Amino acid sequence: MSAHDGCLSLVKYLLFVFNLFFFVLGSLIFCFGIWILIDKTSFVSFVGLSFMPLQIWSKVLAVSGILTMGLALLGCVGALKEFRCLLGLYFGTLLLLFATQITLGILISTQRVQLKKKVKDVVQKTIQNYRTHPEETAAEESWDYVQFQLRCCGWESPQDWFHIPSMRRNESEGDRVPCSCYNSSATNDSTIFDKISPQFSRLGSLGQPRHNVEVCSVPANSHIYQQGCERNLSNWLTNNLISIVGICLGVGLLELSFMTLSIFLCRNLDHVYDRLARYR
């Protein structure tokens, strides 16, 4: 075997092994998404996320797993069987994915102001329409989860929740905010938080989907987070910017490596076919 043939064999099996790993990874992601769909109760009580957002994320995981498995299968079969059409399709799919990621990165970096305004508009619309449509609560429950996890209230401040009709039981009642704004660490009575917001308690019993129960709210003058989520979200992005950029660069370099290996193998298959023809 010549050095060229040995190099081709190395590239082929490297491409096969790497894609086999990602096929297994995609299978695990798919199974995890299906597991969440089947066993919602355990995950709702564990992460504190309500049924509707959890169902959406489980479907996203399942679809991502299927796409990862499909792309990895193209690479595995194309490399192992030396099918040029599959290798070309594998390269084209990776190139399209890489170009999409680059385009999204450019758009996010150049349209940051417009993107921030769009996010603000979506959040404010979610707050204004909070619990006005009981059958459509996914966005509202997701925002509740954001407030609970980032320890914030409203977009700019808790005042964003003031005068929202669904937050008041009667006209004489003062300003109220959702239970996700409640700061349980600000009081020594830890049982209060479990009573008024069991859907966010890791230890509390699980209730039914929230659109079937009364809106959970607390007085605005009680122990609530005083900072808006805009600042907390900006701080989180700033603190994790290096990690986010590192992950994006790592994924991009990995895709470039796979594209290089696949196109190298695809372009050099002629030498393999010529060698087989001489042996015949």
Image: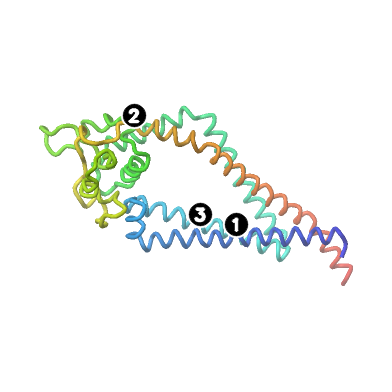
Q: CA distance from mark 3 to mark 2?
A: 34 Å
Q: Quadrant of the N terminus?
A: bottom right
Q: Residue at x 23, y 31 (%)?
A: 162
Image position of 115 (left or right of 182): right
Query: Residue 123 lies in what quarter of the image?
Result: top left
Number of the label disc, if any, that sits on residue 71: 1
Q: CA distance from mark 2 to mark 1?
A: 42 Å
Near mark 3 (Cα within 10 A), the count class, few <14, some 14-19 or many ≥20, is some
SS under mark 2? loop
Q: How is the image coloured?
A: rainbow
* Residue 51: x %, y % from top left: 32, 54
In the displayed structure, would residue 269 be above or below residue 117? below
Of marks 2 and 1, the one in the foreground? 2
Question: Farthest left residue?
Answer: 172
Q: Which residue is mark 2?
A: 156
First of labels 2, 1 by sequence position:
1
* Residue 93: x %, y % from top left: 62, 51
Query: Residue 173 lies in what quarter of the image?
Result: top left
Q: Which residue is mark 3?
A: 64
* Residue 70: x %, y % from top left: 57, 59
Residues at badges 3 and 2 in contact (C-beta under 8 Å)? Answer: no
Closest to the observer, 188 or 241? 188
Q: Residue at x 70, y 61 (%)?
A: 79
Label 2 amino acid? Glu
Image position of 46 (left or right of 85): left
First of labels 3, 2 by sequence position:
3
Label 3 amino acid? Ser
